[in-house]
Image (tube, helix red, strand yellow):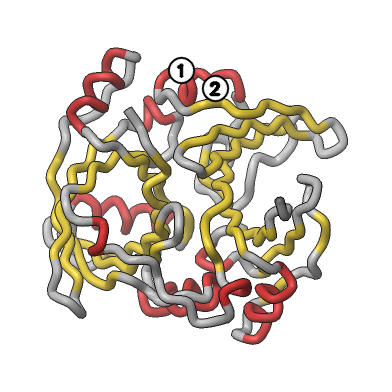
Amino acid sequence: MLTQIDHLIVATDDLDEAQRQCVALLGRTPCWTGSHPSFGTRNVIFRLENTYIELLAPEGEGPVADALRAYLAESGPGFYALALGTEDADAAVAEMRKRGLSPSEPVEGLAHDDPSGAFRRFRNVWLPGEDTRGIRMFVIEHLSEPELLPLSLPVGAPDAVVKRVDHVVMMTREPEEAIDFYEGKLGIRLALDRTFEKRGLRLLFFRLGGTTLEISSPLRSDAELGAGQANPESDHLWGVAYSVGDAEAARARVLEVGLKASPVRDGHKPGTRVFSIGGSPLGIPTLVIEPASN
């Protein structure tokens, strides 16, 4: 039914500034800069090895533009939505309905790239917030050639630029209900369920197409679920962890372009090296990971 974490959507009211921040953060240039004529939005895309980051801003009239403006007015720029990939939107709709969800019928969309004049076609299936526990989420089937979204070109040494999204972080107060939704209804494999008493967290790790969805749940009912949200008590998208070849080289690169970064430290997973990006670029708490060597 679902094949991958297709892309992450970042809402912004200043697309030029968001693009500059994303180039600095990833060390890569955009592979697509254009618009969705029927949505009333403009976008900039950065393709990584396993998914892509889409910066999205309202421009004209349309339901997506209206929803973006409402979100930006309430919450400001940040992690807006999660797109899950499928090879067959009709089959995905049928399966999700069989599992008790209420997806929309597939809706065709069109995207235009300004520099090349190219068009991409796709079909979106929207999931209501009642189904997704408040997370903005949809399923997408791409109808155009993958070559229209090539890997974003690096603007730094290969080991110093971001290669892929390692994991996406979400927050919940109801981990059992999250398991029922992501594994039971969406069919995403629960790879690990661990409680960390010292950290005060229960972490759920779901794996889809080589990318991890990490859902964090505080053990204490009075613990903060995550700041910066219009409703911090509801489930919400929170942060992103990116993978690089060399953490020290990546940290030096981001400092050189004016971002703030913590010192490199050992990660929770043995053999990993990590550092945090200061100031939450793009409005998103961000971690950079050097994976353990094989």
- Toward the viewer: 159 or 179? 159
How many residues crowd mark 2 within 10 Å: few (<14), some (14–19), many (20+)? many
User: On the rendered structure, is 240 left or right of 185?
Assistant: right
Q: Are marks 2 and 1 in contact (CB under 8 Å)?
A: yes
Name the residue: 23% across, 42% down.
141
The residue that label 1 is drawn on is 184
Q: What residue type is labelled 1?
A: Gly
Name the residue: 80% across, 46% down.
270
Mark 2 or mark 1, earlier in chain: 2
Which mark identifies residue 112? none
Which mark identifies residue 179? 2
User: On the rendered structure, is 173 left or right of 276?
Assistant: left
Q: Which amino acid does label 2 sit on?
A: Ile
**Where's residue 188, x and y in %?**
46, 28
- Under tag 2, what secondary structure? helix
- Toward the viewer: 116 or 23? 116
Q: Which residue lies furthest to the right in this view?
A: 198
- Under tag 1, what secondary structure? helix
Q: Residue furthest front?
A: 294
